[in-house]
Image (cartoon, grey):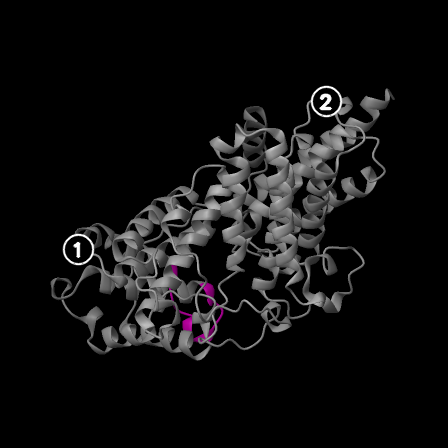
Amino acid sequence: MDEFAHEVTQSFSSQQLKSTKKVIGIKWPGSALVQRCLEYFDRNGLYSIFPIVDVEAMQILLNANVLDQPPNMNRAANRACLVAFAAMITHIHRHERAFADADPDAYLQAALTLLPEMLLEPPDIRTLEAVTILMLYIAPLGRPQAAELLLGIAVQLIYNLGANRIQTPNEIHRKDQRSQHLRALFWHCYAIDKEFSIRKSQPPLINDADCDLDLPTTYAQETSERHFYMKPLSSKELLFPSDLRFSVLKSKIFRLLYSVGSQALPEARRIQHIRELDQELSDLKLGYPAKCRPEMFATESAPDYLFHDLSIRGVNIHLEYYYCLGKIHGASNSCKIVSPQSWSPLPSSAELCFEAARCSLIYIWRVRQFVNRHTFWLHAQFLLTAVFSVFWYLITVPASSTFTRDLKTLEDIAELLVQLDKSTGDGETYPPLYLAQAFVERLVSLARHSRPRVEGT
């Protein structure tokens, strides 16, 4: 890997590719812009996907002219929440005419300057909102360490505010807006925490045993087709960016298959856990409308009309399914390959693990219109994990009947990364895309050579 990194760096320099590091200053959004953001958020039902602020509470702060008063007149958390919210909305919806002159990255920097002061204040729900928004903004930018630090702060706030628990036996049925909003913030942090945990195979910050994991009362557990497509949203129905049940499942996958304790379990017990988790994942998938299940999309022959108006939430659900399937069956000893001779015929868990990787890459190719430099880090984990799994299969079973098809799939992904880097139109090269492209192309080259080398040709 060190040699590869050196070669890529040399290649980047020798081609004199341009990649200007953007200098980001600090800029404070005006109250009028924050008001437009709040109205846009409320009017379009965005609370359904991102329940990050209490609209009524935010309006009260705006009416009080919090941003126009001297800093010492208001809590830092109140100002940070308003500024971070403006950054988030103008960043996600940067193409809206109302936000044409906005500078979300500069607003983010402004909100971050308030973080030290916020941490010295007694925490409240605005503090948690501000930190959660900052984390959600930074996480997809390819800066996981910074996002993890913010997540650590958010988790402590969750425990301090009691958001990890339903406070009274009847609260699950209460309509109290504040308590429901607090629980929605908990679920945002829970989902990010479990994603980081399974991605890095490290213990999560949130311990399930210390939490009530009842889904929000307004969460859409009965999934319909409209939850997969771009349909009008309602703030009265919570959807989140993906299905929260995948987050709960990821927590179980890590605890039962990847934690230190699980590694010491007898193989028979681990196989039992794999089967149980596979069944839970299958049951979750079967709860989706037949026309919206991932296998309907993850094929070369799926008709194009299926992908029309597919929402980013629909894409996330499909990719999460294959990612979880791969993680479940990838924990089997049959996937821990020492040599090509050590696993023939291919055990079922290994078959499922590698088929999940194939499907992920085919799916990403079919929804390539969703992948760009702004969303790359949202999909990078799915893409790169699947790429490496398919590559591993190619070099270990070069005589497989799917070799040619699998190699073509990797070549398609490499070409996709090339096209993404060219699509910016500003002559700039996006380094993460360049690095990913070079990495996939190197794997493709190694895979091509694996077959003749094994066959002795």
The span picked out in magenta is: 92-104
* Nearest the eye: 376 or 134: 134
Q: Is residue 131 left or right of residue 313?
A: left
Does residue 18 appear in the picture of this structure?
no
Amino acid type, residue under disc 2 in the picture: Ser
Q: Does the stretch in magenta take in 93?
A: yes
| Pointer 2 residue | 339
Measure the alpha-carbon separation of dots 2 and 1: 57 Å
Amino acid type, residue under disc 1 in the picture: Glu
Residue at image coords 64%, 50%: 279
- Label 2: how many Cα within 10 Å (few below 14, some 14–19, many 20+): few
Dot 1 lies on which element? loop
* Nearest the eye: 174 or 307: 174
Residue at the farthest front position: 169
| Pointer 1 residue | 121
Rendering coords of residue 89 (x, y %): 41, 67
What is the magenta segment's predominant secondary structure? loop
